[in-house]
Image (spheres, rainbow, N blue to C red):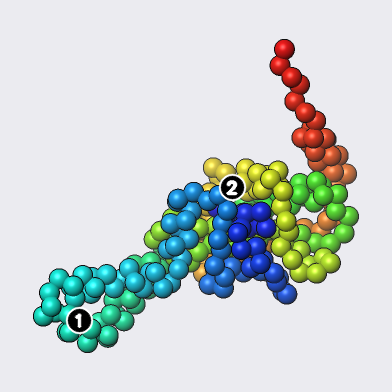
Amino acid sequence: MLVVTRDTLRNAGVLETRSLPKKFFGRVALVPRRAGIGLWLRLLVEMQLLRYFAALIPFILLAFSSSRMALPVTQAPLAMVLLIGVVELKVLRLSDRGRERLMSEDEAARRLDALVFRGRAVLRKIAARRDMAEGELALVVEQSELARVPPLTLVSIQSAHPGPHVLDLDPEERALIERDLFGPELTEKMLHQANLRDGQMIREVRIEARGVSAHARLAAWMDKRAESQPEPAEA
């Protein structure tokens, strides 16, 4: 999972938007800060041109292995297109029947309900931390449509007040999302399967800031106060 905000990206300019929800897959290339090798490799898999190149590696190897095969290989564009199509549509994606076999409609709905429940809890805590009294917050969870690779999840907090924008999240807010959004009863993979089942890879969870309870605001204030206090020195 990548929490998408200004501090987690080297190219934060891609966050600019005129409409919500702001989508990322297939529209912009994200360059994360301090990302591990696993996340970098997964982001590379999302690059369509690299996937095409990888699919054509057998043709490239065949052309370089024998001078007699070089010309026939370069004159077989239809075979190349067919191979790319097989990899993209059959290997990396599921057919309609394959998506239906992932789970029942009721199970997919249960997992999406869990996302709404957990997402609203996260949004309430963030709204309370910021002492927001008006406007709407949306937690946007976008996942890759590639099925047979580990899921890649982009999570952002977006708002239309005072204008459409992606929120700048501080380290505590990012840690809150990473800790509370997913868990044993709803993992990224479980949500990915539900999204594939429905054919919808982006989900929104919304709350009105004015609906956040006084109790939640008090708890957030106490948490922030505890964070700001220095730890006692060891004797």
Q: Residue at x 66, y 67 (%)?
A: 13
Image x and y of residue 61, in percent? 21, 70
Q: Please, is residue 194 above or below residue 76 in the view? A: above
Residue 24 vs residue 71, the one in the foreground: 71
In primary-sequence order, the first of circles 2 and 1 is 1
Amino acid of disc 1: Val
Within-10-Å neighbours for mark 1: few <14, some 14–19, many 20+: some
Of 78 and 101, nearer the camera is 78
Which label is found at residue 203?
none
In the rendered image, the residue lying farthest to the top is 235
The residue located at (55%, 49%) in the rendering is 34
- Identify the image quadrant of the C terminus: top right
In-image side of 105 versus 122 (left or right) = left
Please indicate, yes or no, whether residue 163 appears anywhere in the rendered image: yes
| Residue 33 in the figure: left or right of residue 121 | left
Amino acid at pointer 2: Phe
In this figure, which residue is indicated by the disc labeled 1?
Answer: 73
Q: Indicate the secondary structure of the residue bearing disc 2.
A: loop
Residue occupying image coordinates x 20% and y 81%: 73
Question: Total marks drawn?
Answer: 2
User: Closest to the observer: 8 or 206?
Assistant: 8
**Which residue was labeled with disc 2?**
182
Secondary structure beneath dot 1 equals helix
Percent x, y of residue 97: 40, 70
